[in-house]
Image (spheres, rainbow, N blue to C red):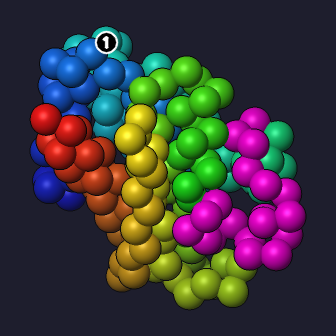
């Protein structure tokens, strides 16, 4: 992870704790990096409820409740899939805020999307925000950038709630 995203993890934990909010993750391409970033912060146990690593589509569907028809038609690298993953983490883990990552980290395109295409969603009580990104670099760099941006998005959502 770059220093920018890593710097956001303490801000997320502090802001969520101050607001009395809990966070849950649903991660595909990042495979737990976002939860690990949050969990590395002292005091994270007050806000981080847990996470689901949903690499396989059947986990996205069965555990997080992502629409199976959507997965079959759009594939897993999709804005609506990210939205449903974040809302699924929020619902399944009983959190106030859910964050999700899905994308193509490479080395090959995935579900018709180019390497570096990533969707990140943050589901808060007021609304769910989804953003599309195009990151560059190798697999590790893309996954790190996705983790950093997920933490940044979480920090912004918490900051904007004030």
Q: Which residue occupies 62% across, 71% down?
A: 77
21 or 140: nearer the viewer: 21
Name the secondary structure under disc 1: helix
The percent coordinates of residue 96 (x first, y second) are 43, 27
> Does the magenta-highlighted stretch encompass residue 93?
no
The percent coordinates of residue 113 (x first, y second) are 61, 84
Q: Which residue occupies 82% across, 75% down?
A: 73
19 shown above or below 26: above
Give residue 154's quadrant in the image: top left
Q: How packed is label 1: few (under 14 Cα within 10 Å), some, or many (20 or more)?
A: some
Give residue 79's quadrant in the image: bottom right
Q: Which residue is mark 1?
A: 46
* Region in magenta: 63-81
Considering every residue shown, the one lying at the far front of the view is 126
The percent coordinates of residue 53 (x first, y second) are 61, 41
Residue 95 visible (yes or no): yes
51 shown above or below 126: above
């Amino acid at each position: 992870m770059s220093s920018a995203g890593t710097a956001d993890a303490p801000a997320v934990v502090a802001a969520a704790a101050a607001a009395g909010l809990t966070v849950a993750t649903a991660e595909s391409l990042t495979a737990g990096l976002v939860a690990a970033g949050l969990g590395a912060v002292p005091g994270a146990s007050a806000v981080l409820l847990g996470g689901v690593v949903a690499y396989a589509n059947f986990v996205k569907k069965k555990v997080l409740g992502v629409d199976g028809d959507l997965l079959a038609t759009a594939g897993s690298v999709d804005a609506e899939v990210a939205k449903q993953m974040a809302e699924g983490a929020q619902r399944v883990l009983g959190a106030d805020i859910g964050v999700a990552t899905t994308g193509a980290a490479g080395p090959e395109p995935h579900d018709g999307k180019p390497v570096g295409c990533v969707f990140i969603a943050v589901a808060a009580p007021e609304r769910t925000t989804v953003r599309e990104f195009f990151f560059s670099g190798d697999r590790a760099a893309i996954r790190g950038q996705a983790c950093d941006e997920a933490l940044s998005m979480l920090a912004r959502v918490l900051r904007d709630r004030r």
